[in-house]
Amino acid sequence: MKNALSVYWHKLASVHRIETLAQRYAGWCYALAGVLLALGWGWGLFIAPADYQQSDAFRIIYVHVPVAFLSMAIYVSMALASIAFYVWNIRLGAYYCRAVALLGCCFTALALITGAIWGKPMWGTYWSWQDPRLLSELLLLFLYLGYMALIAAIPNTALADKIGAILLTIGVINIPIIHYSVVWWTSLHQGATLLKWGKPSMTVDMLIPLCISLVGMVLFTAGYALTAIRTLSLSERNQRAKLKRLGVICG
Amino acid sequence: MANLLTKLAMDGYGLYIWFSFGSVFVTLIGLFLISRWQLKKTLAAQRQLQQSDHDT
């Protein structure tokens, strides 16, 4: 039974299967993401009412919250994929981490940039070195950069993936620190808007475009991940074919 | 026209808002184009390998 389950799990997470999925659905994910982002951002910019305290400046929320949420969600998914790769030797885990690292890094940088731009009119400053939320998010950016530098620096792919998996698993401790930093310590940053117990701190007419933007961004992430995994898998197959041919020539 | 400009000025926060949305938009387009370009390059390399295999 355990063996059958393991076979099923490996089949489900096979790179070949994801390649087929990517071929079929990556384009759809991108197209749907485009439609939802246009709708969510258009609604957020021109239809949603202005905030009674922050006026129109609050509209930055429609880009800041989705990228900040995904910067953390992508890191958590990479840590889980790393565990699957390290513990059960599921190769897709390593492919996934390599594929989405750049995306996670860009989203983290964007969360910091849009947060700083929002901070200037609201807090009077772009950045504060005393703020725990800003510093822990900056640390997340360094974790992404560190992971990408690490896998690029080690020529042995299998070894690079294993060491990268350890870094990602250890680094995941930063995620609850980012989330709860505004609760545990004094921070310029406001408290959680969506991910909290009870009702969200927004009215429905402001919340709907935010949810649409968030779903759009998740679909973009899915499209990018599928395309990048397919590219990595194909490129590794090409490399193997080249080596095989070289072996034939040498032989 | 004046009405549209007032709307785009976003109560004096227009520069902050448009720069934020613009930076995210440009990054998403860039990431999309990079991922498609890398895939096309890899598929072309695969086709070239298959073609040369076929020729030999």
Image (spheres, rainbow, N blue to C red):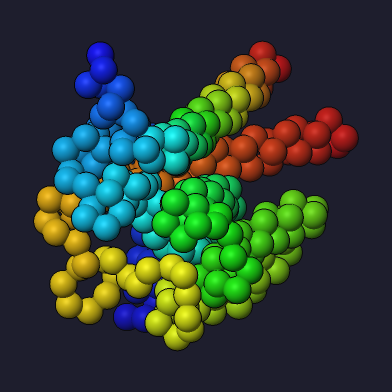
Q: Quadrant of the C terminus of chain A?
A: top right
Where on the picture, by quarter, is residue A129? bottom right
Residue at image location 66% in from the left, 62% down from the top: A142
- Percent x, y for residue A12? 36, 59
- Residue A17 makes an appearance in the image: no
Which one is in front, A105 or A54? A54
- Percent x, y for residue A123? 46, 60
- Residue A133 makes an appearance in the image: yes
A141 relative to A23 in the view: left or right: right
- Percent x, y for residue A47? 16, 38
Residue at image location 49% in from the left, 32% down from the top: B26
A151 relative to B26 in the view: left or right: right
Q: Quadrant of the N terminus of chain A?
A: bottom left
Which one is in front, A1 or A61? A61
Name of the residue lying farthest toward the left = A204
- Percent x, y for residue A115? 47, 54
B3 relative to A180 in the view: left or right: left
Residue at image location 19% in from the left, 61% down from the top: A202
A47 relative to A124 in the view: left or right: left
The answer to whether A83 is drawn above or below residue A122 in the figure is below
Name of the residue lying farthest toward the right = A250
Where on the picture, by quarter, is residue B17? top left
Residue at image location 44% in from the left, 41% down from the top: B16
The answer to whether A223 is drawn above or below residue B56 in the figure is below
Which one is in front, A239 or A27? A27
Name of the residue lying farthest toward the bottom = A184
The mark tally for this picture is 0
